[in-house]
Image (cartoon, grey):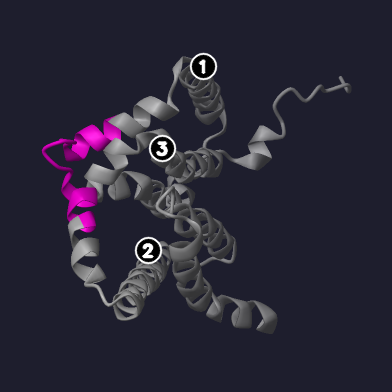
Amino acid sequence: MLYKTKAEKLYPYIFFILGGLTTFFDLLTAPILTLGMPLLCVILLKHRQGVDIKKLIIEIIKVSILWCIAYITIFLSKWIIASIILQKNVIIIAINNILFRVNGSEEYPTTRFGAIYENLKYLYNSALLFMFIVMALIWGVVMIKNKKNIKNMKIIIPVLLVAMYPYIWYFTFAGHSSVHSYFTYRAQAVAIFGILCAMIECIDSKKLSSIGRIKWKK
């Protein structure tokens, strides 16, 4: 138990480091992956340990802010260092790029919800959409027969909250997400993983294990 307590105290530091490292290694492809995927794992682990849902939401907000602070701070540091070395106002250039990534431009017009649609379009092609529909139907049947108590299903609230992160990112950085949707759509791995986790958490595994069980004794 002592080991678990010490490990949990490292979570904020881990997400802060992840945010900083993402600035160097991601290049605006799908940065939210380094926040969303490990955060979903942390949520599920803490839920298994009996952590209250409100505390989980507070944890989500806290580590998400730390990740963002590290991500933004390292970006600013790179601009400042570049301005000093190159003797050029890189910060102004960076600000103009940010405005384009957020709002688009006359050459590349976009809307907030349009950016989300462009990324959804790339992900849910006909084959994947068919698989998702089939999976949802199977889950619905299993859910009807083996659903958990509603009180035990509250975990899906923080899980689905994190699953929304890619779309919050697309909404915020609409210009970049729309123009480069052919690779930014990959950030939706967080949404898919979150939805699958929520679906699993809604099913009582004990009841599920009894499906198809053959009784040999009369």
- Mark 2 secondary-structure assignment: helix
Q: CA distance from mark 3 to mark 2?
A: 26 Å
Q: Please name the residue that numbered disc 3 is placed on.
A: 185
Instruction: Tell me what residue is drawn at x 40 percent, y 27 percent.
Output: 122
Q: Position of residue 88 (x, y in %)?
A: 24, 73
Q: Work out which residue is located at the far right of the displayed protein and give it.
A: 217
- Asked if disc 2 and disc 1 are in contact, CB closer than 8 Å, the reply is no
Report, in whole angstroms, how far the alpha carbon at label 3 lies from the one at label 1: 16 Å
Badge count: 3
Which secondary structure lies at badge 1? helix
Asked whether, in this view, residue 14 is left or right of residue 117, the answer is right
Q: Which mark is residue 57?
A: 2
Instruction: Decide if residue 135 is in sight here.
Output: yes
Left or right of 98 on screen, residue 106: left
Residue 60 lies in what quarter of the image? bottom left
Residue, x 54% and y 24% (percent of image)?
135
Kindly report which numbered mark, 3 or 1, lies closer to the viewer in this rendering.
Answer: 3
In the rendered structure, which amino acid carries the disc numbered 1?
Ala
Quadrant location of the N terminus in the rendered image:
bottom right
Give the residues in magenta: 97-117
Vertical relation: 87 (above or below) 157: below
Is residue 52 among what the camera can see? no
The numbered mark, 3 or 2, whose residue comes first in the sequence reads: 2
Query: Which residue position holds label 1?
Result: 127
Q: Nearer the viewer, residue 3 or 113?
A: 113
Q: Residue furthest left?
A: 106
Label 2 and label 1: CA atoms lie apart by 35 Å
> Disc 3 on helix, strand or loop?
helix
Q: Is residue 205 magenta?
A: no
Side (left or right) of 127 relative to 174: right
Query: What is the number of the mark on residue 150?
Result: none
Residue at 66 percent of width and 34 percent of height: 208
